[in-house]
Image (cartoon, coloured by chain):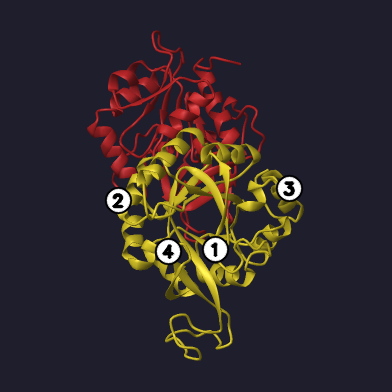
Chain colours: A red, B yellow
Amino acid sequence: MSGGIPARGTRSLYIIDYGAGNLRSVQKAFEHVAVEARVGSDPREIATAPALVLPGVGAFGAAMKQLEDKGLIEPLLLRIEAGVPFLGVCLGLQLLFESSEEDPGVPGLGLVRGDVRALPPTAKVPHIGWNQVEVCRWSDLFDGIPDGSAFYFVHSYAVVPRSPGDVLAMTDYDGVTFVSAIETDNVAAVQFHPEKSSALGLRLYRNFARRAGLVTRP
Amino acid sequence: MLLKRIIPCLDVDRGRVVKGTNFVDIRDAGDPVELASRYDREGADEVVFLDITASHERRDTIIELARRCAEELFIPFTIGGGIRSEEDVRALLAAGADKVSVNSAAVRDPGLIATCARRYGSQCIVIAIDAKRTGPQAPGFPAGTAAPGDERPAEASRWEVYVDGGRVPAGLDVVEWAARAVALGAGEILLTSMDRDGTKDGYDLELTRAVSAAVNVPVIAGGGAGTLDHLAEVIESGGADAVLAASIFHYGEYTIRQAKEHLARRGIAVRL
């Protein structure tokens, strides 16, 4: 993976819609920080987008099936391989992995080695609410965001990367520590919802858009 | 660490914010989405909109409200009031609401909780309970009669569930109803003390404690906030995971930030 040069022609970030919920709030969050964003499920748009966002709520297996039925997996993998900045959000983080306990036997995108496991029943599940994100190493994604800042979570499963080097941030929930952000090359993803995390969430989206040179005002 | 939440509640009548005192005295306080955005900037963790006219008219106005909030608000929001069916829940979630709060309809048809939780997930189903203290008397039974299965001491406090905006007693015990709603799939309980609502005397700590102990989902305490200490007390001694308040914020007595700082000074983990 190399490059990261935005395609000519379009200056609009592309939010991949595979039929899992309302993506308007994600789009509006980018627009709020002066980043043009389109929502859709067009493989040709994916193939030319300067940056991609994969959001999502719902179940792992159903989401993979939707991506497959809409013919989005191959263009997505090709575009990521071409080095375009990619951001996964919530289920969009989990889909990057090889498999999930939520739907055993369904392969994920496999871009990150490791799997997705249910949060242990010792904690209240789903994990809902504002929780603190401890960033493990420097990344421009968290530029201007103080370590330990709170973001809004809603999930029942958490990712377990095989390589510690992929871990970008961790979060503690009632004594259960899980990976709340990952990053490898041009692929980044977060378990929380930046579009529901007020000013710092918007900041994170803006930081991501900046990677693709899509920030239009200072 | 999961943080305790402060949630301003906006009562909405035909698209405008109002706040009732004991459900009667009402004053106008502006555009709901603008007010909610201001609360977001001040540090509110969520916003709850309660449509007080939806039972009678214009479901479309709350769906429009959800759509506007999804576009302009960057914190989670809940919409409640007048939700009668699974179709109402679906329409609000599709319009962008993060959660819906169901009250009377869930009492009349508890199966609605299970249906919605299965279809949309427990995380977006909030059950709102309006609670009125009955003393030691078991709700729905003549004075001095023990309710079957109630193992609490005869002299213990009890509360009755009210529906239809607090007008109609439902004959249900609040603690039992909360536990049943959670067993059916409710993801949160929004608990309002009718005795305290609008009084500014503080939350009903005993009520909040009783419900918090009976369920394993977050309890949002509502009704009675008058000071910042009231917010802290219901978290510390009532076991609330979140506090709901309206008038202390609407009329500028305190800002959300002051409330957060007050809680933090008392050692409660909040988002500052």
Q: Position of residue A68 (x, y in %)?
A: 25, 33
Alpha carbon distance from label 1 to label 4: 14 Å
Identify the disc placed on residue B164.
4
Residue B59 image position (x, y, % from top left)? 36, 47
Q: CA distance from mark 3 to mark 1?
A: 24 Å
Task: Tell which residue pokes out farthest to the bottom in this image.
Answer: B144
Q: What residue is shown at x 41% (from left), y 55% (from top)?
A: B122
Crowding near pointer 4: few (<14 within 10 Å), some, many (20+)? some
Residue at horizontal 58 percent and vertical 87 percent from the top:
B155
Q: Could you confirm whether marks 3 and 2 are on the same chain? A: yes
Q: Quadrant of the N terminus of chain A?
A: top left
Q: Going from the N terminus, do you reach mark 3 or mark 1 first?
A: 1
Give the residue at mark 2: B87
Q: Chain of mark 2?
A: B
Instruction: Decide: is B190 above or below B209.
Output: above
Q: Is residue A172 above or below residue A146?
A: below
- Give amino acid for label 3: Glu
Q: Amino acid at mark 4?
A: Asp
Viewer-nearest of labels 1 and 4?
4
Say which chain tag 4 marks. Answer: B
Residue topped by disc 1: B192
The residue that mark 3 highlights is B261
Q: CA distance from mark 3 to mark 2?
A: 41 Å
For label 3, the crowd category at 10 Å Cα-Cα, with few meaning under 14, some 14 to 19 and many 20 or more, is: some
